[in-house]
Amino acid sequence: MKDRLSAPVFFEFFAGGGMAGLGLGENWRCAFANDIDPQKAAAFQENFPHTPFKLCDIGALTSNDLPQIKPDLAWASFPCQDLSLAGARNGLHGTSSGAFFAFWRLMTEHRGRGCAPRCVIIENVTGLLSSAGGRDFSTLISLIAEAGYAPSALVLDAKSFSPQSRPRIFIFAFDAALAHAVTRLEEPPDHDAAAPRALQSAVSALPKQARDKWVWLAARPPETTGETLETIIDQSAPWAQREATRALVAAMGSKQRARLRAMEEGATFSFGAGYRRIRIENGCKVQRFEARFDGLAGCLRTPAGGSSRQFLVRAGSGRIDTRLMTPREAARLMGLPEAYALPKSKTAALKLCGDGVSAPVVSWIARAILEPAMSANLQRDAA
């Protein structure tokens, strides 16, 4: 049985740097990958030179471009810009996030050839739950149900596996066999981090056909690994000049500044991370530096503007230092191995990380949900 499970096959769409594949691990085989971004594609092909990859808009793909096989998994981390609470909230019909429909059209076409994936996993920001007043989530889940899949979802935060706060929703579409084999709950769970009130309310609002097919998964991630921000720090990276640090500290709120001053008096260094943000105070726009000192980095973002670059803070032994997070530190937060070849451009490397899916989260999904269900299927087939 182990040999038969040694290489489940998957397709990776919106693949970026291949983080979903990294998370699935060596026991899985990527038979096809696609992305539209040339720099991400170059990174993918450098790190996975033997994986079939097509660089193009997913809307240009047809089933003819895919291997004519029935994959165990199709993974899609489609663009989040129109779903993010920080964005314009144009929803699934926005220019970027609307790429979901091209992906689903492709899956529908492939299913028409008898090659429907056994499981589809769709990853995005939790803003999907509230986008368009909940209609976008309902649309997506209804499409899954209409295709004959059993839908499910979990909200998973990368902080359970690495020192980064990065909550994301992972939507599952199981075929009948996997839906029967997956470990499930017979009743909706009590509200928790993986099935928060927002998710349960969104499921309750689904059309009856979709709601009747819904599966509540029993698997739950660990609360934390115990790793802190200090574990990803590049000790050789130079810290900013004192003037730059003083400017950031001056832009902090009084309570955060007081906490930082207390850390400064510590015998050893403590670490924090933060972003510059524009806030409205007394009717005026004010740039603030907002940091956290709970052992976690904030959610990585793409470096589209200066405010999207995350800073590190080091305080102790009578000093305070700051600097921008390096691409390798960002890669560590995403669970990328040290051997992973990042783009040479700092901006491209940070974009690859900020747009990616946390590899350790994917690894947990494979171990806790997918592989046990596949194994149960094989045992039932052999009986």
Image (cartoon, grey):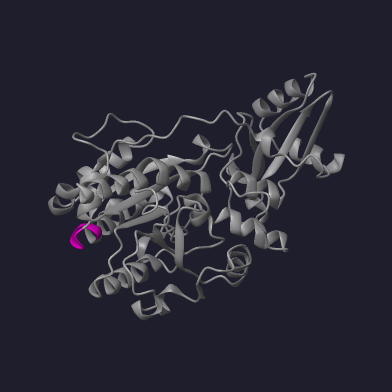
Q: Could you tell me if residue 139 is visible in this image? A: yes
Which one is in front, 28 or 378? 378
On screen, residue 121 versus residue 188, left or right, reads right
On screen, residue 286 versus residue 187, left or right, reads right
Which one is in front, 375 or 115? 375
Q: Main secondary structure of the magenta part?
A: helix
User: Measured from the top left, where is residue 279 in percent x and y?
Assistant: 59, 43
Residue for point 32% across, 40% down = 198
Answer whether residue 245 is magenta in the image: no
The count of marks equals 0
Which one is in front, 297 or 83? 297
On screen, residue 231 versus residue 363, left or right, reads right
Q: Is residue 255 above or below residue 173?
A: above
Q: Could you tell me if residue 130 is visible in this image? A: no
Picture quarter containing residue 347?
A: bottom right
User: Measured from the top left, where is residue 369 in percent x and y?
Assistant: 35, 43
User: Measured from the top left, where is residue 48 in percent x and y?
Assistant: 58, 64
Residue range of the region highlighted in magenta in the rendering:
144-148
Q: Is residue 383 above or below residue 350?
A: above
User: Measured from the top left, where is residue 109 in percent x and y?
Assistant: 28, 74
Residue for point 38% across, 74% down = 67
Residue for point 33% across, 43% down = 372
Which one is in front, 45 or 306? 45
Residue for point 68% across, 49% down = 338
Answer whether residue 145 is magenta in the image: yes
Picture quarter containing residue 351?
A: bottom right
